[in-house]
Structure formats: structure tokens, C-alpha cells
Amino acid sequence: MHDKNEMMSRPVVKKELVEYMRKELKPFSGKLGDLENYANEKGIPIIPHETAVFLNLLLSQIKPKQVLEIGTAIGFSASLFAQHLADGGHITTIDRFDIMIERAKNNFINLGLDGKVTLLEGDAADLLPTLEGPYDFIFMDSAKAKYYEFLPYCMNLLSVNGMLIIDDVFQGGTILHDEKDIPKRVRKIHRRLNQLLDLVLNHEALDSSLVPLGDGLLMIVKKEKVDFSYILKEIQ
């Protein structure tokens, strides 16, 4: 599978197992499967198949009513989530890249999902403070250096007992390296991801798990109300 995310060429699970999962896990059928195949053939970055299958199974059990996605890309993951919405459910997804927005809109129409999905155009840093929620499922797959900054908004918008999943938190395993050994161009990502993990994994108001699929999923359940607004002042 080709991907513009360089870390996907350094999966955190053994290469042979990744190949096995991508080959043996059941493919998606119909237009959703066509969209996934198209993205992979063209090297368009979407969640890898093993992650998509996991999320498909998870959401089929959760059946969320209100979903928020940060990072639409061409709309594959939102289209996947839309298969499992509760009756009357809706997805709000955010992206700032014009070419992705146009492709996603067309894909939502092609899959007959435009009535279930609202695509907000712009920077998540500007849009997140304007949302009201609550959302019972949030998926964040955007700029990795922004995850820590976006966490307070996500936690504020997430319902109690709701789930937040953050994609690509392992950076090909380099998340464990000393910062001085990290190339300067990605040190901010390294620092922010470590801050995120240090905070979330040990927080008493959150239940969390790490799943080594793709470049790593951080799964968080909000057990009670929590205020992380101090982060916004901290990073200014």
C-alpha cells in the first residue's frame, strides 16, 4: 500500500503481519470498497485497511448518534463511520485543503451520504471552538503537532462515556526516541505527541488504550467531565 505518510512505511507491527492483515482481512464491498481501492492505487493517504476493519467492527457495536471527525481527506473514514450511525445520526467532519474537500464532497454524494455528513471547511483550530456537541464518538486524524492543542476542545465536545480515537500516535516507533535524536523538522510533533500520551495515559478521568494498528491508535473514553483548557494557555 502506498501512502504519503512516510511513517506508514515503518509500521510498528512486523511487516509480515501487516501484509497478512491487509491481505486476509475481508475487503469492503460496493462503493466503499471502490473508494478504498482507488485511494490506495493513487497513493492518497487514508487509514490503512487493518485500521479501517477494526474501526468498522468497533462502530458497528457502538452505533454512535453524533460523530465528529477532524481530518476528512477524501471522505473514506467518514463514509465508513456513516455505515454504523444510529437512527437519525449525523457526522460532522473538518478539513482545510480545497482539493480534499472537493473530492470528499463528490464521494459523499456518490455513496449517497451527503444527507448524513456535514463537511466544515477551514482550520480545525478555528472551527472546534465554534462547535457545541456533544459527540459520542470523535476521530482525530489531522496534523500530529496539533493533537495536544486540539485535545481540550475534543474533551469538551465529547459526551461522558463517549470515545475519542486519535490516529498515528507512534510515528513509526520514533515516539520512544530521545528528542535530540529526532530530526529538527519533526521535533515539535515528537514533543507534542509525548505530552499527549503522558497526560492521557495517566489521567484518572479517562480510560485509555493503545492499539498497534497502522501507525498506532490512541483510544480514550471520557469517564467524567474533565477540563483541559489550561493546555491552550500553556502552548501560547
Image (cartoon, grey):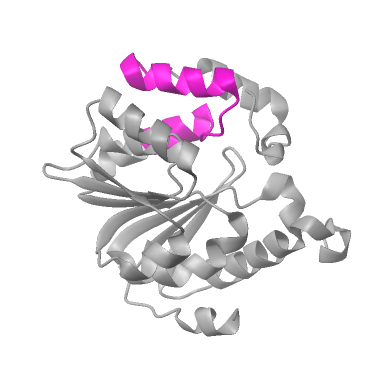
Q: Residue furthest right?
A: 181
Task: Residue 88 in the image: state x and y as whole percent.
Answer: 11, 44
Task: Residue 23 in the image: state x and y as whole percent.
Answer: 55, 16
Magenta span of residues: 27-56
Relative to 79, residue 62 above or below: below
Left of 167 or right of it: where is 137?
left
Relative to 125, residue 85 above or below: above
Position of the N terminus by quadrant? top right
Q: Write the residue at 29% across / 65% down.
A: 131
Residue 226 forms part of the magenta stretch: no
Foreground residue among 119 and 39: 119
Write down the quadrant of residue 26 in the picture.
Answer: top left
Q: Report the magenta stretch's main SS.
A: helix
Foreground residue among 34 and 48: 34
Write down the quadrant of residue 204 in the picture.
Answer: bottom left
Residue 40 forms part of the magenta stretch: yes
Relative to 226, residue 160 above or below: above
